[in-house]
Image: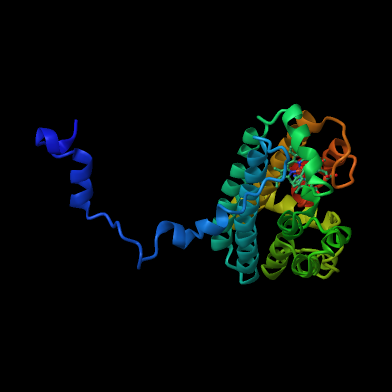
């Protein structure tokens, strides 16, 4: 019943008045102004003709992934800088956030998994040759974690900004390289060829570094900060693999064995990515623990 009719004030409007809620934003910055929602919410432009209901899901799944990738890069770059100045504690705080972002990215595959092959087949022709292959931010994350592959930079020859940023990252030390440099400064016997190498080349396992980690894992209490960082890095790699695996599963259920729009073999190509490792010594050392 209307509050003016029964003489009782509507508890909702009474609460609004008591709280002094702001109503006039003609001269003040609003929620939408601060977050630039006009830009953000006008960036979903489906291409399917006739319009397909499910294309909005496909676009938003990718756009939200790209937003989380942006934050992931921000945190990983900061963690790398903190390691360069020997600030291990704050670097670990960054990695804690990185892990939560990764979980969110992995969990959100379940939304896209509701897309059936028939629904996707209606959208796919409008994607032309576009593909996740051309995600510059994804490639930045791969490079920051140490999976260097100069061939992937050529994919961005059409986008100068992305190409320059990626080419720079290719030539810079990765997060792992900076962790190993930190270990070297702390007196660990990190082999010289690990500390001084061409950063643009793919990382190769070093047996000498496995020996260093074998000592750390044999007596964790004597190397706690280093030991903890090693385990955090393994968590990050584990989480990354979980994302890759969920991608593979979703791709398998939507396009089966079809070749990818980006030109790869599709599922077979994505399955091979599961054999990649960012931190090979941290996995190799496990065979040695307690042996
Ligand atoms: C129905 C959904 C999807 C399908 C069918 C699909 C399919 C594929 C295929 C076949 C490839 C291999 C490259 C190619 O030949 O195109 C690929 C690569 C890739 N996709 Fe997707 N994808 C889907 C959703 C997503 C989403 C939501 C993301 C999130 C950003 C994503 C990110 C990527 C990335 C980053 C790559 C490159 C991976 C690498 O180089 O290891 N994909 N995708
Ligand atoms: N490679 C996908 C196409 C695809 O998934 C895609 C296309 C445009 C923008 C993002 C995409 N997602 C990830 O690869 C396919 O072969 O169907």
- Left or right for 176, reference 133: left
Estimate the x, y position of residue 273 in percent, counting from the top left: 82, 44
Estimate the x, y position of residue 271 in percent, counting from the top left: 83, 38
- Left or right for 128, reference 89: right
Name which residue lies at 59% across and 43% down.
Answer: 104
In what quadrant does ligand 1 lie?
A: top right
Name which residue lies at 80% across and 65% down.
Answer: 170
Give the residue furthest to the left. 7
Of 50 and 286, the residue lying toward us:
50
Estimate the x, y position of residue 67 in percent, counting from the top left: 61, 53
Q: Quadrant of the N terminus?
A: top left
Q: Quadrant of the C terminus?
A: top right
Q: Is residue 57 visible?
A: yes
Name which residue lies at 59% across and 51% down.
Answer: 221
Task: Determine the image quadrant of residue 70.
Answer: bottom right
Estimate the x, y position of residue 71 in percent, counting from the top left: 60, 57
Name which residue lies at 82% across and 62% down.
Answer: 156
285 w.r.t. 74: above or below: above
């Amino acid at each position: 019943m209307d509050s003016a009719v029964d003489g009782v004030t509507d508890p909702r409007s009474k609460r609004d008045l008591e709280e002094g809620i702001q109503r006039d934003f003609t001269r003040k910055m609003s929620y939408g102004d601060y977050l630039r929602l006009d830009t953000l919410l006008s960036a979903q432009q489906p291409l399917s003709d006739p319009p397909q209901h499910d294309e909005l899901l496909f676009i938003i799944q990718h756009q939200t992934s790209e937003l989380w990738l942006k934050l992931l890069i921000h945190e990983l770059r900061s963690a790398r800088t903190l390691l360069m100045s020997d600030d291990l504690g704050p670097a670990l705080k960054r990695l804690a956030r990185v892990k939560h972002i990764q979980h969110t990215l992995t969990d959100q595959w379940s939304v896209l998994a509701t897309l059936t092959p028939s629904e996707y087949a209606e959208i796919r022709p409008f994607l032309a040759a576009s593909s996740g292959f051309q995600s510059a931010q994804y490639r930045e994350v791969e490079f920051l974690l140490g999976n260097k592959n100069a061939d992937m930079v050529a994919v961005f020859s059409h986008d100068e900004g992305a190409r320059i940023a990626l080419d720079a990252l290719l030539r810079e030390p990765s997060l792992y390289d900076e962790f190993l440099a930190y270990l070297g400064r702390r007196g660990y016997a990190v082999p010289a060829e690990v500390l001084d190498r061409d950063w643009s080349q793919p990382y190769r396992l070093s047996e000498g570094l496995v020996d260093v980690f074998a000592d750390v894992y044999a007596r964790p209490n004597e190397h706690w900060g280093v030991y903890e960082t090693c385990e955090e890095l393994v968590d990050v790699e584990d989480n990354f693999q979980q994302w890759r695996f969920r991608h593979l599963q979703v791709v398998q259920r939507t396009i089966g064995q079809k070749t990818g729009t980006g030109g790869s073999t599709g599922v077979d190509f994505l399955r091979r990515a599961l054999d990649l490792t960012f931190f090979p010594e941290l996995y190799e050392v496990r065979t040695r623990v307690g042996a």
